[in-house]
Amino acid sequence: QAANVIPATATLTLSVRALTAAVRARLEQRITELVTAQAASFGARAEIDYQHGYPVLVNHPAETELARAVALEWAGESRVIPTLRPFTASEDFAFMLEKCPGSYISIGNGPATPDNSLHNPGYDFNDDSLSLGATYWVKLVERFLARPAV
């Protein structure tokens, strides 16, 4: 624990996120190669315990289009972001999307600020968005159930 002592072991922990499964696999390969080579360059060895957490979340096109169409009809074009930039969140829903077609959507909760963003202890949920979100889900379910059987 002292700054002037070289420890016998060290642990490096990191979170790796990617937007595609192929990039995720490549990152694992390169991290393993680099860590092993870096340790060897100092006459040491590295043990890598690479654990896959959440999978890459990939929306299905048809379900995403349905969710978008309902949002556009219900909320109007001015309140729907046409193309949300991909982001690398760790999301449980990714496991569901691996097994069943669907779409992960975001319902706005107001502007984020450094002191009021998700996963921040100062986060203050905008309660006014509850009825907005609930109404959207009702509209989406109604549209989904009204679709012709496949």
Image (cartoon, rainbow, N blue to C red):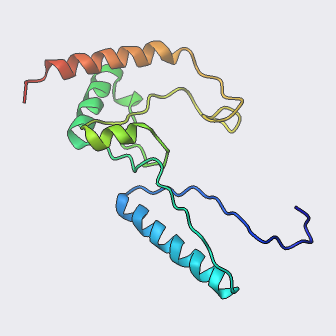
Task: Find residue 87 and report its horizontal and vertical position in percent.
Answer: 47, 48
Q: Nearer the viewer, residue 110 or 42?
A: 42
From the viewer's perspective, is 14 left or right of 90? right
Q: Nearer the viewer, residue 112 or 150?
A: 150
Q: Is residue 16 above or below residue 96?
A: below
Residue 1, quarter of the rendered image: bottom right
Residue occupying image coordinates x 48% and y 15%: 130
From the viewer's perspective, is 6 left or right of 12? right
Residue occupying image coordinates x 53% and y 71%: 31
Task: Find residue 90 and report its horizontal and vertical position in percent.
Answer: 49, 44
Q: Is residue 36 above or below residue 84?
A: below
Q: Is residue 101 above or below residue 78?
A: below
Residue 124, quarter of the rendered image: top right
Task: Find residue 142 and report its horizontal and vertical position in percent.
Answer: 23, 16
Q: Quadrant of the C terminus?
A: top left
From the viewer's perspective, is 54 left or right of 143? right
Q: How many marks?
A: 0
Task: Find residue 7 and report its horizontal and vertical position in percent.
Answer: 81, 70
From the viewer's perspective, is 12 left or right of 24? right
Q: Nearer the viewer, residue 140 or 119?
A: 119
Residue 74, quarter of the rendered image: top left
Residue occupying image coordinates x 45% and y 12%: 131
